[in-house]
Amino acid sequence: MSSNKETFGKTVGFVFAVCIVCAALVSFSAVQLKPLQTANKLLDKQTKILEASNLLEKAGTKSKDIVATYNKYVEAKMIDLDSGDYIEGDTKLFDERRNARDASLSSKPENDIAGINRRSNNAVVYLVRDDAGKVDTVVFPIVGSGLWDLMYGYVGLEADLNTVKSVIYSDHKETPGLGAEVMNPKWKALWPGKEIYDDAGEPAIELVKGGAKADNEHGVDALSGATLTSNGVTNTLQFWFGEEGYKPFIAKNSGGLN
């Protein structure tokens, strides 16, 4: 009996020791890899912003060239969404997802058509300049519900703050071949030249089921077989370019950006 107890004790001790060692290795790996993960996340964001401003081809595919192009042409600025004013803040540390989970840094939209539940009080916009130093594109982050979860992306507008240059999604969980077609280059190519606002200054951009007519300056073809994702894209765009999104900022800067 004593021998059995001793054997059981050794087994438990061995298992416990293995668990401790494995936990230590996992913890060590997480700490060691965190800087690399942070750098990769930042690089992905910079890549999407360059894509949204049509500068990715100029940057190429090498990480160092993407970073250099971003640093040369892009200026990140924090804004207060309610007032549309620029505010002080560290744009590199800003995290919309974290803010949206913090009741002291976010609020519940009155008209939550985008299905985000809470909206960060602040946002970061990206002013993209040409070689002469003039603002050529403004890139706006967006987030809204798709079929399965929130979808994150960027909208690039020309300097008039109305004409679409691009709609680029970066993070989603939509169904391959259906909602995931937001990543399809053919669909993304439908956006340039479309207009966000109608003559009354209201967000009119939308995805049109069955296809948008050629003369529809606000309409883009809906995603085939993905009605809920398409509706989500429409609602996301109309929310973020409405009064509870970027409209106050756009109204204040419609005369031109410096």
Image (cartoon, rainbow, N blue to C red):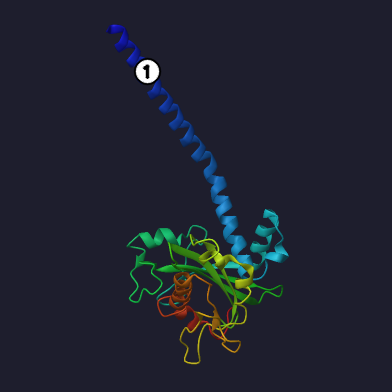
Q: Give the camera-side residue of 178 and 195.
A: 178
Task: Tell me what residue is drawn at x 44 percent, y 71 percent.
Answer: 228
Q: In the figure, 28 relative to 151: above or below?
A: above
Binning the other alpha carbons within 10 Å of mark 1 as few (below 14), some (14 to 19) or many (20 upward) gives: few
- Residue 22, x across and y down, in percent: 45, 30
Furthest-left residue in this view? 1
Q: In the displayed image of the protein, which residue is found farthest to the top?
A: 2
Residue at 60 percent of width and 67 percent of height: 184
Using the rendered view, name the quadrant where residue 69 is placed.
bottom right
Work out whether residue 182 or residue 255 is closer to the camera in this orientation and state it: 182
Tell me the quarter of the image containing the C terminus: bottom right
Mark 1 lies on residue: 11
Q: Quadrant of the N terminus?
A: top left
Q: Compared to 167, does 19 lie above or below?
A: above
User: Type of residue at label 1?
Assistant: Thr
- Residue 76 position (above or below residue 238): above
Residue at image position (47%, 76%) is 234
In the image, residue 87 sits, relative to residue 1, either above or below, namely below
Q: Position of residue 125 (x, y in %)?
A: 52, 70
Front-lying residue, 48 or 191:
191
